[in-house]
Image (cartoon, rainbow, N blue to C red):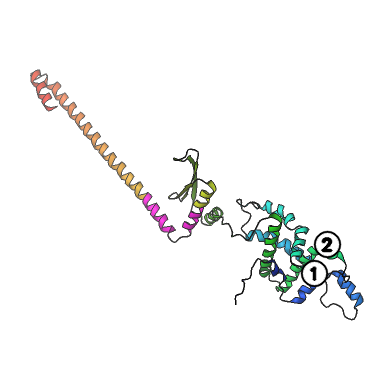
Amino acid sequence: MQFKQKDPYNLSNLLEFQYPDIFQKAMTFKQYYQEYTSRNKDNPLKFGTNENFIELGSDLIDFYYTDFFVSQELPNKDHKTFKTFADIRRQKQTVLSEKNLAEIAQQLGLKDKMFVSTNTNNEIKNNQKIQTQALKAVIGGHYFDKQKDLNLLRNLMMILYQNLIKKSLDESMCLPKSENFKGDFKEYMDKHPEFSYKLNYLEYKSKFDQNQTIYEYELVINDVLPIKRDGEQKRIVERQVFKDAMQLLKSDQFQQLLDDSIRSQLDQTIDKSCYNFQESELNQQKFSSEIHKILQFEVQQGKLEQGLEKQDFGNLIDSFLQKY
């Protein structure tokens, strides 16, 4: 026999109570309690009314609103609707409107479960405010049913918000979380001041299609470890370079790669210095040789001038030319 796997986002999970009496109280309104008690003084209701549950549920719905978005890694500038916290606050009135909450209550079938009046023909159950209060009472009741465990209650609120947002904004929040690699990278670098980075950006035309722009990002860590990516879609390229950077930072080989890059850069610097030194040595030797020749020439010239007074001029010239 096969059993269907339980859907964690099924709205009917809001109706599952460990203690049925708590749910019964959540469905009992003050008007019904008073009408019933006035007619059954010897047998009063033992559960009480849902007044406190309604107030508590309202506070809990408001409390978990921002918490829900944070759990979904929102706001995110790449998201369709919730790009900033201002967007989240702005949509709050829409998401938590009485109309939306009343529709959730209708989906749960609370209209047939609530006790509003002893008058069975009373149309008050169709009132949106009453339906909204019934839903809030259910949420307030869960606080006690879950033994005041806010983590267990958070899971239920996730279900509520998933459905409210889908209903009011036509967006499904059940999709896998969109990872914010750029934000994760910056957060990682803030926590590790021993690392630094530079982000270089370049646009150029494709060699194969002059109408197509190529976007290139280069992320250089500690001035020695470059990560370069390019492509036709700017946002995807930027996301990829930060994704690859995060994978590198979290890898066991990162420090080794960083050390190797530093060592390679140092070797290149040393080789260049050695080359410059050798070139300088050669230039110095060449310069010394030229100076030496000039000095020899001047010495011989002096001897020539002195010899003019003692020897035949023609013989001296021949002797000098033979040497130079």
Q: Secondary structure at mark 1?
A: helix
Label drawn at residue 112 = 1
Residue 146 within the magenta-colored segment of the rendering: no
The answer to whether residue 194 of the structure is visible from this angle is no
The answer to whether residue 60 of the structure is visible from this angle is yes
Q: How many marks?
A: 2
Q: Nearer the viewer, residue 101 or 58?
A: 101
Q: Residue at x 16, y 24 (%)?
A: 301
How far across and how far down the image is residue 208, in percent?
A: 44, 40
Looking at the image, is 143 positioned above or below residue 92?
below
Which of the two marks, 2 or 1, is nearer to us in this view? 1
Circle 2 residue: 127
Q: Residue at x 90, y 72 (%)?
A: 35
Residue 245 within the magenta-colored segment of the rendering: yes
- How busy is the neighbourhood of tag 2: few (under 14 within 10 Å), some, or many (20 plus)? few
In the picture, the quarter occupied by the N terminus is bottom right
Q: Nearer the viewer, residue 205 or 322?
A: 205
Q: Is residue 272 left or right of residue 116?
A: left
How far across and how far down the image is residue 63, in percent?
A: 71, 62
How far across and how far down the image is residue 202, in percent?
A: 49, 42
Looking at the image, is 215 positioned above or below residue 74?
above
Q: What secondary structure do most residues of the magenta stretch adopt?
A: helix
Q: Which residues are magenta?
A: 242-265
Q: Is residue 323 left or right of residue 208?
A: left
Residue at the far bottom in the pictured view: 42
State the CA–CA distance, disc 2 to disc 1: 13 Å
In the picture, the quarter occupied by the C terminus is top left
